[in-house]
Image: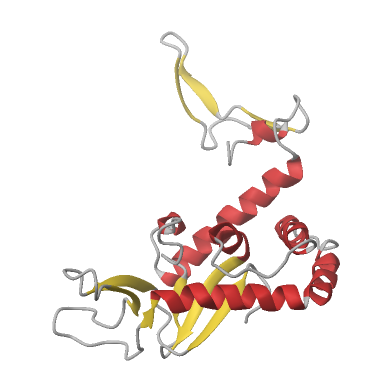
Amino acid sequence: MLTNEKYKGDALLQKTYTIDFLSKKRAENTGQVPQYYVEDSHPAIIDKEMWEAVQLEMERRRNFALEYGIQKLEYATTDKPFAGRVICGSCGKVFGRKVWNSTDERLRRFIWRCNGKYPAKGEKGCDSRHIDDGVLYQAFVEVFNTLVENKDYFIGKWQERLESDNVLVRYKAKQFIGIFEGANKIREFDVDLYFALVEKVTVHDGKRIVVSLFGWYRY
């Protein structure tokens, strides 16, 4: 559904062709016969602009994963929202979550550490420091509340983006405006807001945290 043009009301004809008329065996058309693209050939299931935005978002995710050596962004879940999204400010690799004192629940801690710190057993690589799980959660709360405090300014900026030629930029701008128009400050981490707003979190030496919204701003 995410890539099939039929869902936006268009049709690509002759994706396959008959290679044996007796057996009616067909094969994928990779240039053997002409293909024809027909717009508005049937009622659409989803809006064309939404479909185009999805294609750009999928491309963005592929490029993001390629840039940071991530197999897939879907590693992030409600239990591990930072998976695949915390980037080392020193070497550019992804941070992975580790458990300290896993045998004693009273002392157990979740920390995030650069995956390039120990590239092989006994071998030390990146010298960046780890960061506690709770610090990342609190960083998002503080960034979101800062945006709420200055939402009139940012909504004005996002409204300018509604005129962009890029359909994904327009979609995200509309989404951000909808989120912040009636938004109030939050006290606790909100995973839905986080997934809607944040592209990545860059950690510099375990101290300075830069939260990047999709496409535009860093905090």
Q: Position of residue 146 (x, y in %)?
A: 69, 79
Q: Is residue 82 left or right of residue 15?
A: left
56, 98: nearer the viewer: 98
Instruction: Determine the residue located farthest toward the top in the rendered image.
Output: 22
Q: Is residue 195 left or right of residue 90?
A: right
Residue shown at the point (55%, 68%) measured from the top left: 188
Q: Is residue 199 above or below residue 138?
A: above
**Residue 50, picture quadrant:** top right
Q: Is residue 63 left or right of residue 37?
A: left
Q: Position of residue 185 (x, y in %)?
A: 68, 70
Q: Position of residue 174 (x, y in %)?
A: 77, 57
Q: Is residue 63 above or below residue 44?
A: below
Instruction: Determine the residue located farthest toward the front in the rendered image.
Output: 106
Residue shown at the point (73%, 73%) measured from the top left: 148
Task: Tell me, yes or no, if residue 87 can be seen here.
Answer: no
**Residue 74, picture quadrant:** bottom left
Q: Is residue 136 above or below residue 83?
A: below
Q: Give the total number of marks visible in the rendering.
A: 0
Residue shown at the point (54%, 66%) measured from the top left: 189
Residue shown at the point (58%, 41%) measured from the top left: 2
Query: Can you say which quadrant of the picture contains the C terminus?
Result: bottom right
Q: Is residue 62 above or below residue 2?
A: below
Instruction: Determine the residue located farthest toward the left in the rendered image.
Output: 122
Task: Tell me, yes or no, if residue 214 can be seen here.
Answer: yes
158, 184: nearer the viewer: 184
